[in-house]
Each structure stands twice: as C-alpha cells, then as structure tokens.
Image (cartoon, rainbow, N blue to C red):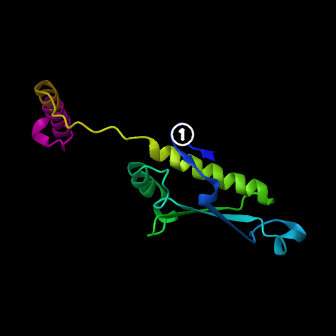
Amino acid sequence: MIQITPHIFIHEDELIETFVRSSGPGGQNVNKVETAVQLRFDAKGSPNLPRPVFYRLQKLAGQRMTKDGVLIINASEYRTQDRNRKAAQDRLITLIQQATIVPKKRRPTKPTFASKQKRLKQKSERSEVKKGRGRISRSDY
C-alpha cells in the first residue's frame, strides 16, 4: 500500500512498471541494461481515487494521461532501476497530492466608487502631463 494522504491509499498492484533502455550516459551498460522505468496507473479505474481528485489529476497531468484515464510517468534520471522506480513513484504521489488540493472559489467583486474616482483622477493628471510635452511654437515664447 502506498499512502498518498491520510485518507487515500493506492495498492501496489494497481501500478504497472515496465523497464526500457535509458538514453544518455551509462558507459558500457547503456545498451545492455534496462534502467528507465515507465510507470502506468489506471487513475480512472482505481477504486481508491475519489472522482473529484481524478478530474483535477486529469487537468494536472495533461499529456501524461491517456484518453482512457491511464497516467504514464517516465523516469530515467538515474543509472539504476531501483532509483528510477522510486523517482517515478515519488512523482506519482506528488501529482496525486497536488490533485487533492481543492482550489478556492473566486468571488467576483466590483471596484468601489472611491477607487473609480481615484483612477479617473490619475488618468486626467497623466493626460495633462502628456499634453505639456507638445512642440513649442514661436507664439509661446
């Protein structure tokens, strides 16, 4: 069991890990050892993930989630399978934790009468400053 929050847990059998050859540095092992991890999590089909959390996760994941609701996370930063597995799981946990945060609702407000007056006053003052920047004609001397 992987604990996401005090109320959300994910069973490890819900995660599908496949190992592929990693690109980048690795010396002699780079073409022989499959160290990169591709972690798949069926978020839509998970019984432990509440629907509102799933919908927020879908927005956060973007291209990393398929149309079927499967979240795919790739990890290939490290040279060992274990460290890449841990990195992928940590990213999954962080992403789901971010999805559990309910955004605050925005309350539409109107500007106050005083703020409107202040804006108009500043606007007219600025206009006067700009009017004073015109060319000086001979009659102004």
Q: Residues within 10 Å of mark 1 (few under 14, many from 20)?
A: few
What's the magenta region?
Answer: 120-141
What amino acid does circle 1 point to? Thr
Q: Is residue 110 magenta?
A: no
Where is 81 relative to 66, above or below?
Answer: above
Q: Position of residue 134 (x, y in %)?
A: 18, 43
Where is 33 relative to 14, above or below?
Answer: below
- Circle 1 is placed at which residue position? 5
Residue at 14%, 43% (x, y): give it: 137
Image quadrant where one finds the C terminus:
top left
Q: Position of residue 11 (x, y in %)?
A: 60, 52
User: Which secondary structure dominates the residues rendered in magenta?
Assistant: helix
Residue at 50%, 57% (x, y): give it: 46
Residue at 63%, 58% (x, y): give it: 13
Q: Is residue 137 magenta?
A: yes
Q: Position of residue 123 (x, y in %)?
A: 16, 35
Residue 129: quadrant of the picture: top left
Q: Position of residue 62 (x, y in %)?
A: 46, 61
Q: Secondary structure at mark 1?
A: loop
